[in-house]
Image (cartoon, rainbow, N blue to C red):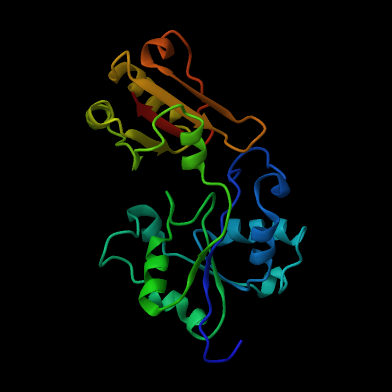
Amino acid sequence: MQASAKGKLFLVPAPLDFGCATQTPLPETMPSGTLAAAARLTHWICENAKSARAYLKRIDALHPLALPLREQQVTELPREVHKKGDHEAGGFDARPLLAPALAGHDIGLLSEAGMPAVADPGSSVVRAAHDLGVQVVPLVGPVSLLLALAASGLNGQNFAFVGYLPQDAAQRAQRIRELEAIALRDGQSQLFIETPYRNTALWDALTRTLQPTTRLAVGSGLTLATAATRGLPVSAWRREGAPVANDTPAVFGIGR
């Protein structure tokens, strides 16, 4: 590479087993080409340095890293980006993080699970790359939202991801009713997620608040041996127990 050439920003997916009791072997969920491309990188922007290095160690066992793990340049996104999001225009300025790319080094962008910048931090880095004329290269890997949608039985031609629902019970119920109204009126499936250990509270709110004929789907532990996906009318769910463990990453969906 010529000294004057800019590096590229690679969006590197991570397996969906982050924080889970067991891990799925990488070859079962991650394309070899993606892992090989990641192994060639030596500069990283990530959500969490500890989990990024743990993932690189798993990659190294299959595709030797271009540099030893201790020599990899790993930079974390600021904590406020995790808490407040980085997708708002005029928000966090990620351009300084891309200085290595302007110097000719390829950079990997990594979140803790799935595709960075999709239901995870990273969009500010992608936006900055475009502003600086740095080529953005998304690599192939698991995206929990699309896996859950495909397995839900809900409308996959028209859907929206709305992030997290409010924690306050009254506000959460109001938001559920708003999303249900959109789903029933427009046929647009509504997808959302919850942090582990809040699944039960959300599920109870959904089955109490939604209309009996509204379809409710959940995909949990996706790509793990314990993965489960199911979608039924709310009236049927009310006769059954919660289908998702409280500590398991899950994607929820409602539709008609």
Residue that lies at the very extreme toward the bottom in this rendered image: 3
* Foreground pick, 137 / 52: 137
Residue at horizontal 36 percent and vertical 18 percent from the top: 207
Q: Is residue 236 left or right of residue 171?
A: right
Q: Residue furthest top?
A: 239
Q: Nearer the viewer, residue 48 or 44?
A: 44
Q: Quadrant of residue 93?
A: bottom left
Q: Is residue 3 left or right of residue 93?
A: right
Q: Is residue 94 visible?
A: no
Residue drawn at x 56%, y 55% is: 13
- In the rendered image, which quarter contains the N terminus? bottom right
Residue 115, above or below 237: below
- Please indicate whether residue 51 sits to the left or right of residue 129 in the image: right
Q: How far across and down, in percent of the image, does residue 200 sit?
A: 44, 25
Name the outermost residue toward the front: 157
Which quadrant holds the C terminus?
top left
Using residue 112 as the reference point, say whether residue 185 is left or right of it: left
Question: Can you say whether 222 is above or below 169 in the image?
Answer: below
| Residue at x-position 56% and y-position 62% | 49
